[in-house]
Amino acid sequence: MDQELVVYFDRRFSELAQELKRDLGQELKRELGEELRRDLAELGTELKRDLGQELKRELGEELRRDLAELGTELKRDLAHELKRELGEDLGARITASAAETRRHFDVVSERLMDKIQLVGEGVIGVDQKLDRFRAEVADEFRRVDRRLLRLEGRVLG
């Protein structure tokens, strides 16, 4: 039964780790994505205001292309960095959760082992009492048997 329990907990820990990883990843992506969008929107607004007409006049189409490429590269770099950080953080959380669950399982299994040992000791005690009772009953039967033989001897003899 202990092996089955270990297999069950290992499978359950795996499922919980995957579920936690998925949920945390989605939540962090959503939160960081919204924050990144706001920051990028603010940054875009500031750039538009500061550079405004001067950029349009002087740099024109070339600057727009360069900014688009830079934005794409920045998004790619930020996305890569975000994925890396999320992966590290999520991995650490999963590892900590697994360790905590393992400790809890160890405590529970130790309690169960103690209870099983107490039951075993109780069974041994009952077994010993039963052996003593059998010996007493056998002794009583021998006495009754002797009395019966004596009575038969008196009645027949």
Image: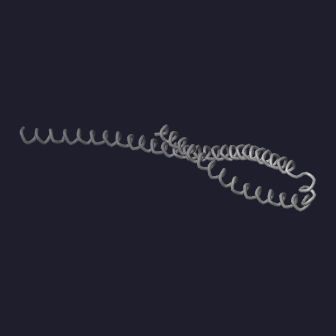
- Counting from the top left corner in percent of width and height, residue 56 is at 89, 56
Q: 154 or 94: which is nearer to us?
A: 94
What residue is shown at x 39% (from left), y 44% (from top)?
126
In the image, residue 152 sits, relative to residue 24, either above or below, namely above
Q: Position of residue 68 (x, y in %)?
A: 80, 49
Q: Position of residue 129 (x, y in %)?
A: 38, 43
x, y (%) of residue 43? 84, 58
Please indicate whether residue 8 sits to the left or right of residue 58 in the image: left
| Colour scheme employed for the rendering of this structure | one colour
At 59% from the left and 46% from the top, the residue drawn is 18
Q: Of residues 152 and 6, which is closer to you in this image?
A: 6
Between 19 and 38, the one lying in front of the other is 38
Residue 39 falls left or right of residue 92 = right
Q: How many marks?
A: 0
Locate residue 13 relative to residue 76 in the image: left or right.
left
Instruction: Report whether 88 appears left or right of 61.
Output: left
Q: Residue at x 59, y 43 (%)?
A: 106
- Compared with residue 85, is residue 27 higher up or lower down, i.e. above or below? below
Quarter of the image where one finds residue 153: top left
Quarter of the figure with residue 49 = bottom right
